[in-house]
DNA sequence: CTTTATGCAAAGGGTTTGCATAGTG
DNA sequence: CACTATGCAAACCCTTTGCATAAAG
């Protein structure tokens, strides 16, 4: 299963890499920090180092298996690359992360870049929200 | 001049605060890091500490005089708060930062948050672009 | 004068790196 | 068996904090 993805990415199939990929797979769309992953695994009794988690995540990112998000607050959040682009909404009260995607906004972004003589390489749109009090 | 803004913000008018505010004023729309500011001032011979630059920037941000941006890459970038909201386009080749604003996108964002039962507290939209090769 | 702000150096949090050892193909 | 990956600890980068001194009102 996952081992296939690893090989395709040109990465040796090692214990830490399998564990991390499998964890991300199981928690698909959960947006974890390196430390979240490190804890989830060590709590379960796995013998893995935090440095390895960072190294593996960087390799996964380079290989396009994983997407790294820099929300506010220092830590980076990682999620499996689903292939389908989407943006994020972060609840400032609960910390919950919701994904969304809006064709219209995507289109407008390209249009704006073009108007300035550029083309979009990548973009980041994050809405910091709070539950609507009704 | 600037001293007025400082008083209004409830901040004592001190040398470091005047220097930093004045520098940001002169480089309006230039997006500087704390270190950029620290260097610009010390290079000019001013006696100021990096810690003070950080402290002052935090106070300015709290007072709404300055906006802090967390682009990719660890450092935070600061700019004077012009009062008018805008988003950013960062050229990945030159590092140039261009500001833009699109009513339609703003509207869609609020609409999306609302659809999920939230209201927008803040948002961040950054386009990472490269010059269009024609 | 009293109080707040400053500079310096040390501490912090997240992430990276050096190195000897362990694991993969 | 050769080579890459791992764990640990130390190093790093940016930012914050503690403390004695200096500046502001």
Image: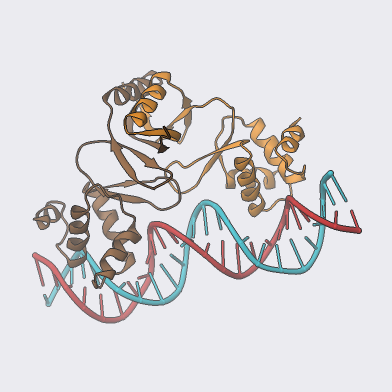
Chain colours: A orange, B brown, C cyan, D red
Quarter of the picture containing the C terminus of chain B is top left
Location of residue B48 (image quadrant): bottom left
The x and y percentages for residue B98 are 31, 40
Q: Residue at x 35, y 21 (%)?
A: B114
Question: Is residue A133 something one can see in this rendering?
Answer: no
Please report the residue visible at 42 percent of the width from the left and 21 percent of the height from the top.
A102
Q: Nearer the viewer, residue B79 or C12?
A: B79
Residue, far front: B134
* Left or right of residue B76: residue A18: right
**Residue B118: which quarter of the image?**
top left
**Residue at coordinates 46% horizontally, 24% vertically from top-left?**
A100
Is there any visible trace of residue B119 in the rendered image? yes
Q: Is residue A99 above or below residue B91?
A: above
Q: Position of residue D24 (x, y in %)?
A: 13, 67
The answer to whether C23 appears left or right of A55 in the picture is right
Q: Quadrant of the N terminus of chain B?
A: bottom left
Residue B128 image point, x, y percent? 42, 38
Number of marks: 0
Quadrant in which residue C5 is drawn: bottom left
The residue drawn where x is 34% and y is 50% is B77
The percent position of residue A56, horizontal first and vertical second, equals 66, 46
Residue A87 vs residue B133, the one in the foreground: B133
């Amino acid at each position: 299963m996952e081992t296939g993805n690893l090989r395709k990415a040109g990465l040796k199939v090692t214990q830490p890499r399998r564990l991390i990929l499998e964890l991300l797979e199981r928690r698909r769309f959960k947006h974890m920090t390196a430390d979240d992953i490190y804890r989830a695994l060590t709590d379960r009794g796995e013998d893995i180092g935090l440095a390895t988690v960072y190294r593996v995540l960087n390799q996964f990112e380079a290989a396009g298996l994983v997407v790294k998000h820099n929300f506010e607050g220092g830590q980076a959040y990682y999620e499996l690359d689903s292939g389908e682009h989407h943006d994020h909404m972060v609840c400032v009260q609960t910390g919950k992360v919701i994904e969304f995607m809006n064709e219209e906004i995507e289109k407008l972004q390209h249009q704006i870049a073009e108007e300035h003589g550029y083309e979009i390489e990548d973009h980041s749109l994050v809405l910091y929200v709070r539950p609507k009090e009704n």
